[in-house]
Amino acid sequence: MTAYNFKVQFADDVESGRKTQTIRARRKDGHKPSPGENLQLYYGMRTKQCRKLRDAICEYTQEVSMTEAGMKLDGVTLAPNRILEIAKADGFESVEAFRNFFRDTHGFPFRGDLIKWL
């Protein structure tokens, strides 16, 4: 079982089921969930405000790379409309907000995993 913590800006969408994926930087130990693995999704882990948002099951993972110029999933360059779909599914209103979040939070180039759950 893997637990994920979400920032306040994403908590309501995770809890309601509107957000059904997350993109995370690669873990140092290399672990990423396997399809069928149980996931626990939280807000405020390690704080007094901690609350479980929901239980989920990993549907699949995909490798993500992102730069100012674009985005790839499993090594395939994505068209702008597909990047917008992923940005919206991840809780962002625009590609610009999505890209800015990852650039400001992780820096570019970004490498990680898209984790989709049921």
Image (spheres, rainbow, N blue to C red):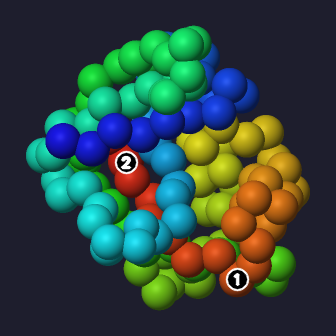
State which quadrant residue 9 falls in: top right
Image quadrant containing the C terminus: top left
x, y (%) of residue 32? 29, 62
| Residue at x-position 50% and y-position 47% | 22
Q: Residues within 10 Å of mark 1 (few under 14, many from 20)?
A: few
User: What number is the disc on residue 116?
Assistant: 2
Q: In this view, does 37 lie above or below 104?
A: above
Depth check: give the residue in front, 40 or 28. 28
Circle 1: residue type: Pro
Location of mark 1 (residue): 109
State which quadrant residue 102 falls in: bottom right
| Residue at x-position 42% and y-position 79% | 74
Counting every numbered tag in the picture gives 2
x, y (%) of residue 96? 86, 57
Depth check: give the residue in front, 71 or 113. 113
Q: In this view, does 10 lie above or below 88?
A: above
Circle 2: residue type: Lys
Residue 9 visible to an observer of this rendering: yes
